[in-house]
Image (cartoon, rainbow, N blue to C red):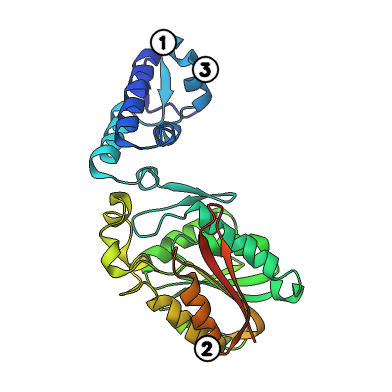
Amino acid sequence: MTKPLAEVSGQELWRWWQDARQQAAIAHIPSFEIEWLLREAGLDRLHLYSGTIRNQEKVPLKLPLEEVMQLWQRRLEDSVPVQYLVGVAPWRQFSLTVSPAVLIPRPETELLIDLAIAATVSNPKLRQGHWADLGTGSGAIALGLATAFPSATIHAVDFSVEALAIAQINAQRYDLTDQIQFHQGSWFQPLVPLKRSLSGIVSNPPYIPSSMVSELQPEVAKHEPQLALDGGDDGLDSIRHLISTAPDYLQAGGIWLIEMMAGQAQTVATLLHQHGSYQDIQIHADLAGIERFALAARS
């Protein structure tokens, strides 16, 4: 049995947890982020909430409490996202490795997978063949598509070599490397051999207007990759590119599905209509009621 790296008294750990919760409240940080750190240190949250931990003379930890405290200070003082501190982010049924090389996958993005599934109900053949996750980042969407469509081959594309390395780690963790192929390059560039054969493309592209990037929460503006955030002057540079190029790669009836920013839905729908290669254009809201997703089919 592996010996714990460190031990701390239950009273000391309890007192620090209480202090950290007060600091979190003052800083408007959700208190569950402290528990994420403690979980990475090997602590069961039930022991915290039950209070029984206070009676333990020694609590074994995988990380010394001093190291946990240092990580918490980075969260407080430097606004480092807790997901980067622990190197993990939950997304759908996955626990994904993340680093500052990739955008932290958001809960609202999970709905892209549900929309892809719903869009193929009337044409089950689309659940086979080739799908592309463009700008894969951590590989979240690629993993979601792979589990939703086990008979399909998923092509995960990213311009960043560092991001692809993270995505491959996540695919390996869930034994999906045989189903997911990784490509380094810009958007469709690595997929030229698949022209007119894709069953669907899904993307969470950069969509923040350049002037707004620096105004985002410091956790985002200071630490998440600019390449995954900055969508040009109006935030629509990448989306316009995907609208104009996707028809060359999608088969007839193939799915075009992207995430976008609040307030962009009408413009994106208009661009899809004006292109002339899309049908069944739909706008879908996220769980907060924000028009977040655009869906269309190749005519």
Q: Position of residue 182 (x, y in %)?
A: 50, 71
For label 1, the residue is 57
Q: Which mark is first along the chain, 1 or 2?
A: 1
**Above-or-below relation of 183 to 66:** below
Q: Nearer the viewer, residue 47 or 107?
A: 107
Q: Which mark is first along the chain, 3 or 1?
A: 3
Q: Amino acid at mark 3?
A: Ser
For label 2, the residue is 275
Q: Is residue 290 visible?
A: yes
For label 3, the residue is 50
Which residue does the image show at 61% across and 88% down from the upper left?
A: 196
Q: Amino acid at mark 2?
A: His
Local crowd at mark 2 within 10 Å, few (<14), some, or many (≥20)? few
Q: Position of residue 259 (x, y in %)?
A: 50, 66
Q: CA distance from mark 2 to mark 1?
A: 69 Å
Q: Position of residue 203 (x, y in %)?
A: 50, 70
